[in-house]
């Protein structure tokens, strides 16, 4: 378990943002990170509540703010998710992540007041991105595999989800400074704004979010090739590679050339020791 101080109040991290901006990806990473820090953490995804309570495959018109029946149904599942979150914190939870659009000031005010009344500290994390190409790629890479679109034609699904985004966009209001603590991430980390952020865990979240990538990346880990010190069983030192070690370095480079497309970027990290520098050199 990683050491961390005991916070005086449990923390509620409330996601904010239009659909297909990376909220769910970010919420999942935050939940995993806070558990790694040693906190009792849990993720509450309102979309999952909707699918469990109302079924899957709703037409985009269901999410139109002018659709009173749809709005009441969505408000109902949001209330259930927040009630479950508060109950979980009361049972001993320390960090809760609420993954939902929370795109209006009215909704955020209700969420904050409900949680603060239960003794939670609230931090909003708003994800902002208007890069049309990135949004479409995100829709195609993630939303098309959602249970909402299982078995549906891909292009039809893209059109439906794009219309859903437009419904949310018409009523969307960005977080303002008088709403309390928030972290706003714009254009995949190109700009990060903070308001009323203090304390150990919120501060750690800022550093974590600053370095969070918006997509999966492959990391290869390797030992260095055999060194002269390895050959004679000596621990430590700063010797060069043996002929066997140099052959390993060449084989490693050939292997990665087969695994990684030629145009893909490759970052190589190594220590300042000769054996690691020489192992990395063919790369």
Image (cartoon, grey):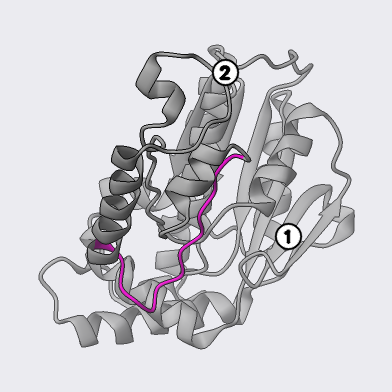
Q: Which of 32 and 258 is in front in this view?
A: 258
Q: Is residue 186 above or below residue 43?
A: below
What is the number of the mark on residue 38? 2
Crowding near the residue tagged with mark 2, few <14, some 14–19, many ≥20 C-alpha atoms within 10 Å: some
- Secondary structure of the residue carrying numbered label 2: loop
Name the image quarter holding residue 98: top right
Spatial CA distance of label 1 from label 2 is 25 Å
- The mark lying in front, picked from 1 and 2, is 2
**Where residue 238 appears, x then y in whole percent?**
58, 29
Residue at the image point whose x is 15% and y is 65% from the top: 150
* Mark 1 crowd level (few <14, some 14–19, many ≥20, 10 Å Cα): many
Q: How many numbered discs sit on the rendered protein?
A: 2
Q: Where is residue 269 in the image (x, y as percent from the top left)?
A: 54, 49
Asked if residue 127 lies left or right of residue 177, the reply is: left
On the image, the x and y values in percent for residue 256 come to 30, 59
| Stretch in magenta | 259-271
Residue at disc 1, secondary structure: strand
Q: At 75% from the left edge and 53% from the top edge, which residue is drawn?
A: 183
Quarter placement of the C terminus: bottom left
Residue under label 1: 184
User: On the image, which quarter does residue 171 sit in?
Assistant: bottom right
The one of 176 and 259 positioned closer to us in this rendering: 259
Are the two marked residues, 1 and 2, in contact with CB atoms closer than 8 angstroms? no
**Residue 217 part of the magenta segment:** no
| Residue 15 percent location from the top left of the image | 60, 52
Q: Which of marks 1 and 2 is nearer the N terminus?
A: 2
User: Taking 163 as reference, is 70 above or below it?
Assistant: above
- The secondary structure making up most of the magenta span is loop
| Numbered circle sitting on residue 130 | none
């Amino acid at each position: 378990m990683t050491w961390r101080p005991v916070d005086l109040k449990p923390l509620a991290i409330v996601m904010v943002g239009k659909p297909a901006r990376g909220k769910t990806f970010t919420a999942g990473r935050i939940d995993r990170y806070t558990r790694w820090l040693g906190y009792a953490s849990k993720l509450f995804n309102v979309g999952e509540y909707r699918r469990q309570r109302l079924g899957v495959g709703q037409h985009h018109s269901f999410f139109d703010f002018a659709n009173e029946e749809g709005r009441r149904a969505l408000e109902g599942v949001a209330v259930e998710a927040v009630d479950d979150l508060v109950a979980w914190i009361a049972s001993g939870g320390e960090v809760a992540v609420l993954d939902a659009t929370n795109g209006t000031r009215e909704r955020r005010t209700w969420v904050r007041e409900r949680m603060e009344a239960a003794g939670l500290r609230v931090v909003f994390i708003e994800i902002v991105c208007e890069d049309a190409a990135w949004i479409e790629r995100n829709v195609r890479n993630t939303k098309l595999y959602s249970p909402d679109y299982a078995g549906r034609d891909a292009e039809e699904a893209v059109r439906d989800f794009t219309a859903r985004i437009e419904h949310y966009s018409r009523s969307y209001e960005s977080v303002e400074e008088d709403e309390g603590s928030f972290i706003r991430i714009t254009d995949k980390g190109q700009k990060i704004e903070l308001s009323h952020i203090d304390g150990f865990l919120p501060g750690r979240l800022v550093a974590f979010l600053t370095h969070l990538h918006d997509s999966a990346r492959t990391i290869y880990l390797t030992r260095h090739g055999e060194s002269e010190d390895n050959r004679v069983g000596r621990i430590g030192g700063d010797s060069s590679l043996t002929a066997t070690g140099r052959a390993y370095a060449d084989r490693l480079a050939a292997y990665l050339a087969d695994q990684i497309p030629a145009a893909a970027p490759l970052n190589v990290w190594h220590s300042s020791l000769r054996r690691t520098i020489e192992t990395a050199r063919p790369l």
